């Protein structure tokens, strides 16, 4: 297996592999390097005939806080509508590739799972969460929509998806379970052992049948046109980036710093 700097990819047990997002000091925010290493590890997993199940988790106190926003885009650096749209379509391609990878993938989520991290978890086959897990897209208050909508309209329906997209509020683990964003919720101290125990049960089924089970279920969403839905959402996100709201927030983040800009963004939404 390759050596990585921002992830840990390892064999956990026979047929079971584990990928750990390993930037705990940044709440595992997904930098471009981490995303490239994620792609490479997924290639390794897919091409390994001895690998049947993959568990994706985060190091430290969170699963993942989303995309790494550093550095912010500087004026005159070549950013155009065309380059933005191409980049967003590539992002959608990445998550659709994760969804279509023929072997089962389980997300093991604890702590924050925000913004782009909900795209990662949303395109895994199974999501197990700890009781402290929180899901949400607070970046929707200032930076645009999720290019794939994290499959929320498909997983929990349009009304609930709108409720949380409109405010950027967090979804707790229990509500995420009730609205089908996650499969099961466990006490934090039992999350890893319970996830591994389920992976063992999956790994007892021959890989050729696992791939067919996954393809059969995924074909349902293919027929419904979810791939085109996500690609269209990426185009809408490109439009969002041209709004005055997003342009003003990006300007603020450059002038005042990311921390101050985030604080100003979230201040009106603080619970009274």
Image (spheres, helix red, strand yellow):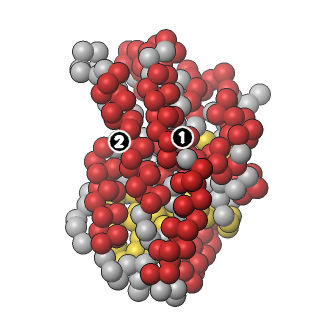
Residue 48 falls in image quadrant: bottom left
Q: Residue at x 47, y 58 (%)?
A: 99
- Asked if residue 101 shows in the view, the reply is yes
Q: Residue at x 71, y 45 (%)?
A: 157
Spot occupied by residue 178 in the image (x, y as percentages of width and height): 76, 55
Between 81 and 13, the residue placed more toward the observer is 81
Spot occupied by residue 167 in the image (x, y as percentages of width and height): 67, 30
- Asked if residue 8 shows in the view, the reply is no
Residue 32 falls in image quadrant: top left
Question: In the picture provided, is 231 more to the left or to the right than 32?
Answer: right
Give the vertical position of 77 relative to 231 (above or below).
above
Structural distance between the alpha carbons of marks 2 and 1: 15 Å
> Considering the image in quadrants, where does the C terminus appear?
top right
Q: Residue at x 38, y 38 (%)?
A: 89
> Considering the image in quadrants, where does the N terminus appear?
bottom left
Nearer the camera: disc 2 or disc 1: 1
Spot occupied by residue 24 in the image (x, y as percentages of width and height): 41, 53
Between 257 and 250, the residue placed more toward the observer is 250
Question: In the picture provided, is 77 more to the left or to the right than 229?
Answer: left
For the residue labelled by badge 1, is the local secondary structure a helix, a strand or a loop? helix
Would you name the residue on which mark 1 appears? 229
Question: In the picture provided, is 69 more to the left or to the right than 272?
Answer: left
Would you name the residue on which mark 2 appears? 90
């Amino acid at each position: 297996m390759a050596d990585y700097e921002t992830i840990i990819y390892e064999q956990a047990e026979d047929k079971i592999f584990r990928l750990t997002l390993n930037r705990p000091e940044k709440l595992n925010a997904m930098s471009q390097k981490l995303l490239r290493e994620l792609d490479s590890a997924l290639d390794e997993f897919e091409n390994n005939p001895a690998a049947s199940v993959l568990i994706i988790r985060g190091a430290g106190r969170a699963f993942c806080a989303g995309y790494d926003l550093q550095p912010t885009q500087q004026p005159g650096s070549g950013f155009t509508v065309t380059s933005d749209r191409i980049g967003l379509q590539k992002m959608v391609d990445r998550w659709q590739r994760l969804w279509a990878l023929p072997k089962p993938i389980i997300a093991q989520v604890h702590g924050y799972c925000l913004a782009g991290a909900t795209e990662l978890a949303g395109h895994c086959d199974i999501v197990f969460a700890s009781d402290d897990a929180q899901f949400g897209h607070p970046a929707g208050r200032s930076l645009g929509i999720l290019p794939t909508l994290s499959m929320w309209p498909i997983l929990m329906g349009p009304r609930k998806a709108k409720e949380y997209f409109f405010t950027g509020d967090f979804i707790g683990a229990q509500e995420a379970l009730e609205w089908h964003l996650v499969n099961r919720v466990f006490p934090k101290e039992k999350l890893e052992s319970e996830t591994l125990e389920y992976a063992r049960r999956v790994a007892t089924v021959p890989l050729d049948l696992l791939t067919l089970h996954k393809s059969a279920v995924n074909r349902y969403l293919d027929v419904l046109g979810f791939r085109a839905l996500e690609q269209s959402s990426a185009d809408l996100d490109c439009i969002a980036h041209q709004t005055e709201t997003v342009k003003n927030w990006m300007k603020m983040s450059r002038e005042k710093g990311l921390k101050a800009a985030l604080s100003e963004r979230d201040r009106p939404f603080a619970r009274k």
